[in-house]
Image (tube, coloured by chain):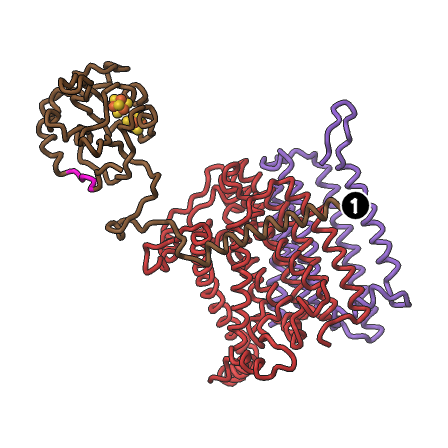
Chain colours: A purple, B brown, C red
Amino acid sequence: METLIFYTTAFFILAAAGYVVTTMNIFRAAIGLTGVLAGIAGLYLLMNAQFLSAVQITVYVGGIMVLIVFAILLMPEASMHLRRENPKWFRFIGGVSAALVFAVLAYSITAFIGAQDAAGTSLEPAAASIREIGLALLSPGGNGFVLPFEFVSVVLIAALIGATTIAKRTPNPETKEEQE
Amino acid sequence: MNIFVKTLRGLKGLLSGMGLTFGYFARPSKVITQQYPENRNTLKLPERSQARIDLIKNAETGRYNCIACGLCVKACPNNSIELTKFKDPETKKFRPEKFVYHFERCLVCGLCVEACKFDALRMTSEFETAAWSPDDLVEILNKDDPWAHDDKSDIGQQTAPDKNEQTASPARDTDRQEHTGAEEKTIQPKDRSPK
Amino acid sequence: MESYIYRTDKLILDLTEWLTEATGSAFAAEVVKMSIAAAVLSAFVGLLAMILIYIERKVAGHMQQRVGPMRVGPHGILQTVADSIKLVAKEGLTPKNADAFIFNLAPLLVFASSFACLSFIPFSPGMTIVSFNVGLLFILGIASVGVLGILAGGWASNNKWSVLGAMRSGAQIISYELSATLALLAIVPFFGTLDFQEIVLSQQKGWWIWRAPGVGLLGFLIYTIASTAECNRTPFDIAEGESELTGGFHTEYSAMKFAMFFLAEFINIFIVSAISATVFFGGWMPFHIEGLDTLNRVFDLLPPIVWFFGKVACLVFVVMWFRWTFPRLRVDQLMHFEWKYLMPLSLINLALAAIAVSAGLYFFN
Ligand code: SF4
Ligand code: SF4
């Protein structure tokens, strides 16, 4: 039964992904992308990774996608259907890079599975509770991720400050605009 | 510090607003909405509600207060009032011969009442004034005067100033008589006594 | 039979057992159970929206010294039924130059996300349709998908006021989502779980709104404000600013598609109130005061589901009360309020909560 659900979801994801790259309307592509991301959240659920699934929905579907859609709404060109006007070699390069990415992914996945098989560990996904995830994120020990965690927060702070600086209204000395 | 004071003051305002609305909510007796057709018999309109105008009678003499000065006719933006006057031989004062009120043109603005310097005009709260034809809405307000009775045939031959000759007086047609007959059928507001 | 009302967890267990026996496999039983749940939930949603709309109109009326609907049925109780029939019978228009696919998809997205949230709500012991160990996180995530539907609907309408309304709406929802989430997160350390049923169980000794010292109350206030804004309700209803935007993102929608937006709006009110009731007011847990056993037993007489709906009803009433009292904010005031006051406040609240938890500062231990 799980296999059936997996294949249905996987088919849905692939179809949506195909739609994203083939449609000529950028907004529809964004909606398709939402479908892909939500489908992936479904796959996580199937693997019993509920926390990851929730994070996937919160961050990607609820956060990133909304951001993308917002960006599209701010573009005047969004409502136009784009025309194919790229030169032939664009498509050629695209095809080659897609094939390369696929090859790398396929290789790494098979290698990973092979390594797992060799080590004799099971491929069954372990259901990690939030407690474990939280401890792992914040423990400084060998299994801990506190350093990357802190780095990420520094990067985010930098991004926030940068965004504020860009968005800040530069005070005009002549009009002496009152800032509330 | 300022911001805390401001916040507290704002909160106080919001809370008192909520208190007010909850007060209304908790006391259904305060509801103003009238369930109109059902409570037609017990309907109580607010004192200042405005509907069609009426003349005021002097309680002692039984005469209308109106001295036919024509101020209301001038004040009316829609030319809804037509007035003919005559000199009363008894008092040597002008009295309205026919005070014709075209309710079909009136917008119940109250400017005429405001203009009247002699406390002769008022707004009533009679709002059930539906009629079958606009002509039914033409009414003679000083109808208690014996000479003003029911005969509207010469309406329009007025002496009072007329702002717009062409549209001011409705066309006289022969149907008029029939409609005047039908006038008894229109809803006659009950409360007509002066304040 | 009677005990089932109090012990709904037992009811669910027995039902599962009986279904497994009847169908012969655990999987089939699960499927049947889910179908029942879906059917019940659908009926519930329709009924809930109708009742909420009726109550909203009545509350609105009485708060303004009016009476609300009075004509259809005694005291107008059939008014929403009549309205729904009218809505269903209407013609569903799609504007000529609209993107029909997305235009029709958008209300579904909004509705589906609200509907999905309902399945995480703990109505009664054991009565949660999907029981996750990260239920709270999931519900917050899914709720944010609704924004996409609103943005898509506004864009696909091919109407610039719709787009403007959608963008206002979207900006507002994602901004206030932060405060709402942070306010809830501040309470999470106290109960140490994200599973809704466990959250309720952790409040046996007292509801978190007063058990968590100060933080609970502050969190509740922040959450109430932020969730009101998230539902796009007055005083935060600039998205629908009728005078400027003629209805905002759903200007072009009619008939069933409009009904879906409308339905989703009212379900959202229910959901945020239900979350608030569960997290701050003990969900279906009856009100208990330690030591007063007689009183506690009297309170226990009411079945948990009544407790749950009672609490939710009170919170929904508060939200309606806001709507019919407060004036509307301007869009810049709205953003100022969120980013300059509410957000910092909820971050402070979170820090305070962390300190309180690590110091073991609970009441009613
Ligand atoms: S109420 Fe206004 S419109 Fe009517 S008669 Fe008086 S002045 Fe004219
Ligand atoms: S203004 Fe008064 S007194 Fe003069 S004509 Fe009109 S109603 Fe009569």
Q: Over which residues does the magenta segment extend?
A: B186-190
Residue B170 in the image: x percent, y percent?
Answer: 19, 21
**Frontmost residue, A100 versus C152:** C152
Of the residues shown, which amino acid type is indicated by label 1?
Leu
Residue C335 in the image: x percent, y percent?
Answer: 66, 43
Residue at x 21% of width, y 40% of height: B189
Quadrant of the rendering where the C terminus of chain C is positioned: bottom right
Q: Is residue C194 above or below residue B126?
A: below
Q: Which residue is mark 1?
A: A160
Residue A9 in the image: x percent, y percent?
Answer: 61, 62
Q: Is residue C286 above or below residue B87?
A: below
Left-right relation of C55 to B94: right
Say what secondary structure mark 1 lies in.
helix
**Frontmost residue, A131 versus B104:** B104
- Within 8 Å: ligand 1 and the Cβ of disc 1? no
Q: For residue C196, what is the image quadrant?
A: bottom right
Q: Is residue C87 above or below residue C15?
A: above
Is B187 in the magenta? yes
